[in-house]
Amino acid sequence: MFTLKGKLEISDFYQVVFNKEQISIDKSVTELVEESFNFLKSFSENKVIYGVNTGFGPMAQYKIEDSQRIQLQYNLIRSHASGTGNPLTERYVKAAMLARLNTLCLGSSGVHKSVVALMAELINKDITPLIYEHGGVGASGDLVQLAHMALVLIGEGEVFVKGQRLLTKDVFTKDNLNPIKVELREGLAIMNGTSVMTGIGIVNTLYTRRLLHWMVACSSAINEIVQAYDDHLSFELNNTKKHVGQRDIAEMMRNHLSDSKLTRKREHHLYKDNKNVTVFEEKVQEYYSLRCVPQILGPVLDTLNMVEKILIEEVNSANDNPIVNVKDKQVYHGGNFHGDYVSLEMDKLKIVVAKLSMLAERQLNYLLNSKLNNILTPFVNLGQLGLNFGMQGVQFTATSTTAENQMLSNPMYVHSIPNNNDNQDVVSMGTNAALITKKVIENAFEVVAIELITIVQAIEFLDVKDKVSSKTKVFFDQIREIVPAFKEDVVMYPYVNKVKSFIIETEIEQD
């Protein structure tokens, strides 16, 4: 059981979203939420407070009568539950719910305690609101997507339970759940914020770290396959650069290769007995896709670490408007709902993931092109050359998918389009940025899956299963359980999809 105290870490999202750990809300948090609600209710009497007794957005100039305040909140929720496109999958919605719950638990929103109690209950019961991908501009937060969340909290709309799409009212009846009753400003407080883009973003970072670990494993194994010299991974060489990411990637690769019987020491081969040699038959240095992995994946790791830092700061921030400050006995109006921080970080993440997929595609090409590697058959064909095709067909898929990633890596952060009667004249497009990043990550898993199958075929062809490192042998066996060694041509798409699903759901060991 995880106890929510108003501060979350990336690891907490992993436990709740991926491992489905149950959550409870600390008593002190509930008391803070209740105090915030009571203060706002009292403070807003005889004062103009946005979203309590005014209209919304450009309609804020219209005062709302006391008798219509509650209806105002329901109107907001229902009118803005207007998303379209594909539904977000469970993990992303659950992460968004956890992010929103944490923000509301900070006591800066003035919601009734029933809101946070019901949200926690829905998370624990794996009841996830139907939230569509399209609809958010990320300025007044994720208004449209969060409206779908709010719709469920008032007992309306639709939810997913164990993959089934059901009416909220039916699920609430079956599970003895009571919808919230709007007391003050619960509609705006639930909807006004960056929690959907941030939730998607955090799941993106969790998948990216897993993807990066698989890419490190692939890069290490290819160095084994070609019996590369290991000095490009050495502590001494990489520590002449000050970048932490480069150093860490090199260390991961050294750990991966620590018991390999295939990588070589330069001093054993090129630093002696070469006086009469005019042309070296073997490469003195490997291609960049093999030799420069720490320098290429280092920025990926450094960027990922920074993205996680910014996103967890956003999760632990009050991203509502207005902000209730019980200590100062004041309410502050501003723009904490704006998603530029998240939007920019998602653009950074998708750029480095696109570069990762480019590296995977180049390594794949190296293995498939016999004129480059000089040790494997064309397309790592284990069958009859000319008659059989080996991995030729799937290279087209990897190349195509990588090209899509290159196109998708263009920034969303700079694509502001004013709307809302120009009230929202500069917007973040943060949710769009997060969703495009999600797509880039999924594409990258596809390319890495194809590379993994090819690496395993190459190890099979060279008959070096007993010489590769123990870590390479682990994933060799894992992939071989999914894709048997093949000489005759087989239909490849089921294998590629199975390997992709496997690596998306499986963490590879990193020391």
Image: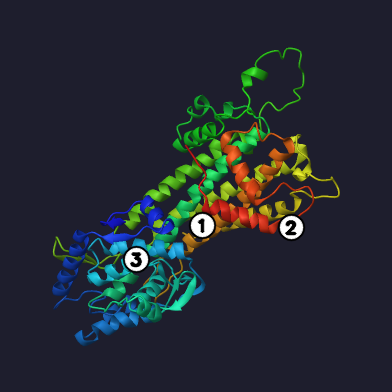
On the image, the x and y values in percent for residue 94 come to: 41, 64
What colour scheme does the image use? rainbow
Residue ID at (23%, 78%): 183
The residue type indicated by label 3 comes to Gly
In terms of depth relative to the viewer, which is nearer, 171 or 119?
171
| Marks 3 and 2, how far apart at CA | 47 Å
Of labels 1 and 2, earlier in sequence is 1
Question: Considering only vertical position in the picture, is 466 above or below 274?
Answer: below
Characterize the local packing of mark 1: few (<14), some (14-19) or many (20 or more) Cα atoms within 10 angstroms. Answer: some
> Mark 1 vs mark 3: which is more N-terminal?
3
Residue 491 appearing in the image: yes
Q: Is residue 51 left or right of residue 302?
A: left
**Residue picked out by circle 3:** 193
Q: Secondary structure at mark 2?
A: loop
Give the structural element (helix, strand or loop) at label 1.
Answer: loop
Separation of marks 1 and 2 at Cα, in angstroms? 37 Å
Identify the residue under disc 1: 411
Camera-nearest label, 3 or 2: 2
Q: Position of residue 88 (x, y in %)?
A: 48, 67
Which residue lies under the disc numbered 2?
A: 491
Which label lies toward us, 1 or 3? 3
